Image (cartoon, helix red, strand yellow):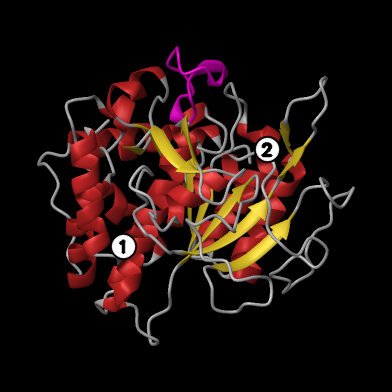
Amino acid sequence: MLRRSAVLLAAALALSAAPHATATPSVKLPIVTLIDSGVNATHQEFDYRGRASTSDQFVGWWDFSAEKKGKDVLPAPGQGWDTQVKDPYDSFGHGTLTASMAGGRNASPQKTPSAYPGAKLAIAKVTYWAGSSTNKQTAIDPYAIAPAIHWAVDTVHTDVISLSIGSVVPVPAVVDSDVYAAIHYARSHGVLVVVSNGNGWGDLGLVPGDPGWASDYASSPYALAVGAQDSTGLLNSTDPEVAAVYAIVGASNKSNTGYTSNGGTSFGTPYVAGFAAAALLASRQGGHPLAVDALEQFVKDSSVDTTLPPQTEGYGVVSQAQLPAALANARAGRRPTRPSPDVSALYVDGVVGTLRVLWTTAT
């Protein structure tokens, strides 16, 4: 991880170049959709003015879970805001953390900075609170993920989707063919899907595992897979496309001013999603709008290739340190400079990219 002083300096630089600060009415603000456990929208990291507002930070919300409704209720075409559970919530906390990493306003110096403070967010809640001594505190509704992706694309008209959900061990893509098909659908409609690349075997972060070509959802050739930066990546991810922050401090779901610490590729993933959205906005502001394939490549090219091998960090690390240059490049329509020869890119796109295609052929 970056030293604390470096984090604070990078945060100051990022805030001075806050992408939303120079938005104009003629430029569409990118939307990031979080598919997760919901959000504590009233936290000081977010700008939520109530369900009747049409101008705050949240542009879409749907509870795909049965936690409060008692059964799964999918939105009808065009329904961008839940009609039964009208205010966002998060019983578990994971979604509040990921949302604060994607577009949190960086209201406290203790928080790990987001790359796009104040980003427009949509929330698809796909987990429910079991809450008994015999059940896990949270459970993922696997049947809700694909509909949530379609909702984000067709109704929210999102630009980026952040998905920090996967399996604890590699599974064949055919098992989740509906989600893989939905990710492909999103990509074909110009939406960048950013996914977490696992936290080692069994989600323990102790033994490297979850190779990119066999890691649930991260094995999709139509998604951008995010691993853990620095030496942490050695015990967590194999074959991500980029790496990002692992240990974070983010917004709490239990307090509107509190913060909590956590770790996992779950949190680097929304950071990269916010980074991508910030770059997309800068490209639009500069008159050089990035299409989805170009946006993914821009994010990868903006990373810094360290001494760790590409099997651990892919192209390199995406962090606050790269944000000012990335925004300047995006506004100017410039492609970031990469090493030559770019060994990491050749490995990620040539070797692992081929394996991802082969692994998901069955879907």
Q: Residue 128: percent from the left, percent from the top?
A: 76, 41
Question: Around disc 2, counting alpha carbons within 10 Å, would you say few (fewer than 14), some (14 to 19), or many (20 or more)?
Answer: some
SS category of the residue bearing label 2: helix
Q: Is residue 220 left or right of residue 312?
A: right
Amino acid residing under circle 2 = Asp
Residue 208 sits inside the magenta stretch: yes
> Which residue in the structure is indicated by mark 2?
176
Please determine whether, in this image, residue 46 is positioned above or below residue 286: above
SS category of the residue bearing label 1: helix
Q: Which image quarter is the N terminus in?
A: top left
Question: Around disc 1, counting alpha carbons within 10 Å, would you say few (fewer than 14), some (14 to 19), or many (20 or more)?
Answer: many
Find residue 4 and report its image quarter. top left
Find residue 105 and report its image quarter. bottom left
> Which residue in the structure is indicated by mark 1?
279
Mark closer to the observer (2, 1): 1
Find residue 17 and report its image quarter. bottom left
Residue 92 sits inside the magenta stretch: no
Amino acid residing under circle 1 = Ala
Which residues fall within the magenta stretch?
198-212
Q: Is residue 7 left or right of residue 238?
A: left
Please determine whether, in this image, residue 187 is positioned above or below residue 271: below
Q: Residue at x 66, y 62 (%)?
A: 61
Q: Does label 2 or label 1 sit earlier along the sequence?
A: 2
Q: Residue at x 63, y 52 (%)?
A: 182
